[in-house]
Image (cartoon, grey):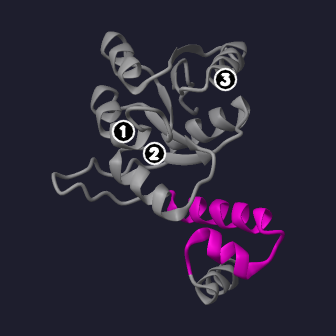
Amino acid sequence: MPRKIETALVVDDDDAFRMTLQGALRRRGVQARTAATVDEGLVSLEDAPVDLVVVDYRMPRSDGLSALHRFRRLCPDAAIVMLTGFGDIPLAVAAVREGADTLLTKPIDADRLLREATALFEAPRAPAPQSSGVRTSYKLDELERDTINAALKDSGGVIAVAAKLLGIDRRTLQRKLKKSM
């Protein structure tokens, strides 16, 4: 039986998004707290750890990426999900390296978020980051595929434009697409 997400912390500077996601999680039986800044989120976790930490990438003063290792230290067993308006492969790799379990793009609905977070508990946990900061990702293929699909959608299906959005060579993108078929 999959582990149930009972508690969550949503860290996002966008008041409307933060409150909407909190309400949606609560309607699904999750005791959700919120924080508008990384510092507020860290204080909240010191008081009481949670099963799920959802943190936005872009926030004023301290971005979510640089705080991931602190969230992980306070909640070593939590599913940590980083949200971003536009995901790319280097950001996904950096997020996982810093302590996130996965990176998802906004907008996201609570059902998908809970599905993804629950799946993280079922998957084998990657080893904790070593002092060198190197960590492997067991979700990279899925993140890469999602990111490529998002770029293709944003580019209207034009591979050259999608490759430019991803910051990779057109031929590299074509190889990745051919490999995934």
Q: Give the mark nearest the N terminus, 2 or 1.
A: 1
- In-front residue for pair 131/154: 154
Disc 3 from disc 2: Cα separation = 19 Å
* Whether residue 162 is visible: yes
Q: Quadrant of residue 148?
A: bottom right
Under mark 1, the amino acid is Leu
Kindly state the secondary structure of the residue where label 1 is placed. Answer: helix
Image quarter where the C terminus lies is bottom right
Under mark 3, the amino acid is Leu
Q: Give the mark nearest the N terminus, 3 or 2.
A: 3
The magenta stretch spans which residues?
139-168
Q: Which residue is mark 3?
A: 21
In reply to whether residue 6 is colored magenta, the answer given is no
Disc 2 from disc 1: Cα separation = 10 Å
In reply to whether residue 141 is colored magenta, the answer given is yes
Left-right relation of 1 to 181 = left
Image vertical order of residue 87 relative to residue 54, above or below: below
Q: Which residue is mark 1?
A: 68
Q: Which mark is residue 101?
A: 2
Q: Quadrant of residue 154?
A: bottom right
Image vertical order of residue 26 relative to residue 55, above or below: above
Tell me whether the residue at label 2 lies in contact with that at label 1, contact meaning CB atoms closer than 8 angstroms.
no
Tell me whether the residue at label 1 lies in contact with that at label 3, contact meaning CB atoms closer than 8 angstroms.
no
Q: Give the mark nearest the N terminus, 1 or 3.
A: 3
